[in-house]
Image (spheres, rainbow, N blue to C red):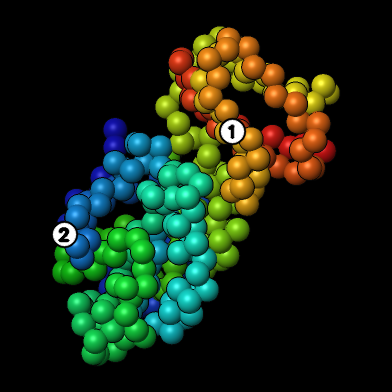
Amino acid sequence: MKQFIQLGLLCVTINFSANAQLPNGSIAPNFTLTDIDGTTQDLYTYLDAGKTVYLDFFAAHCPTCWAYKNSGAMENLYASYGPAGTVHQDIVILAIELDQNNGANELNGISGSTQGDWVSEFPYPIINPEGADYSAIVAAYAANYYPLIYGICPDRRIKVLGPVSTASLYNYYTDDCMSLGFETGKPEKLPLHHDETNQIISLKEPGGIEITDLTGKIVYSQNSDNQTTIISTANFPAGMYVIRFQGETFQTALKIIIQ
């Protein structure tokens, strides 16, 4: 059964101290909130679609939040892996403003206590909860300070990430979430296999395969109608790679390490 927050039934007073956040590995509560563009944002809808979701809790007047925004960490992640990503589209980012005194003027950098124009600078949706919605989301996510970054895998397990680099944000996706982001068929023997000894990847089903390194660079891509496809990894530089496969009976993602 889905764990769901009935927004408006919870109440908390935020105090901006470094109180304990949700424990890593716990289940993220669902929420349904409307962003500043009038679009409904439902967490579990994204997770059920296999997306990894990052929640960026911030405040418009917060200089540390503005500095983190200026680092480009979240923006670069979104550009490469968000809904219109240049590499893949498996990541969703939602920004949630945490000060009830901040409204449209502060978010747009027009007046009030603000660091600048957040609306123009953030390429991803901004949610500005008020009243009961605000109290509910703060309580549900123990959002007691900012900037606060959570990562949530498709299995709904959450992790506190903090304001970290694009590489660290993406490593969370590859290390914790990637293999959970696909609805897969479960044949007795998966038709995708990495043979480290013979330095090959064998594919025993027609389909599309894409291999990227951990920077997101595509190092191999092919759509094959053949029942068997053999890919040599002998000339791949040492490192970790991500294999994505979409076949007739299943789809999956697999991390491999080439020595």
| Vertical relation: 75 (above or below) 225 | below
**Labels 1 and 2 touching (C-beta < 8 A):** no
Badge 2 local density, few (<14 within 10 Å), some, or many (20+)?
A: few
Residue at image mark 2: 38
Label 1 to label 2, Cα distance in Å? 38 Å
Residue 135 seen in render = no
In the rendered image, residue 154, in percent from the top left (x then y), is placed at 42, 40
**25 left or right of 259?**
left
The amino acid type, in three-letter code, at marker 2 is: Gly
> How far across and down, in percent of the image, does residue 171 sit?
60, 51
- Provide the secondary structure element on which disc 2 rests: loop
Q: Mark on residue 241?
A: none
Percent position of residue 86, x then y: 47, 50
**Rendered position, 12 above or below 23:** below
- For the N terminus, the quadrant is top left
The secondary element bearing badge 1 is classed as strand
- Front residue of this view, candidates 156 and 174: 174
Q: Tell me how many marks there are.
A: 2
List the residue tagged with mark 1: 221
Would you identify the image quadrant in which residue 237 lies?
Answer: top right
The front one of 78 and 6 is: 78
Q: Residue at x 18, y 69 (%)?
A: 130
Mark 1: amino acid: Ser
Task: Give residue 17's position: percent from left, percent from top.
Answer: 43, 77
Residue visible at 53% across and 24% down? 223
Mark in front: 1 vs 2: 1
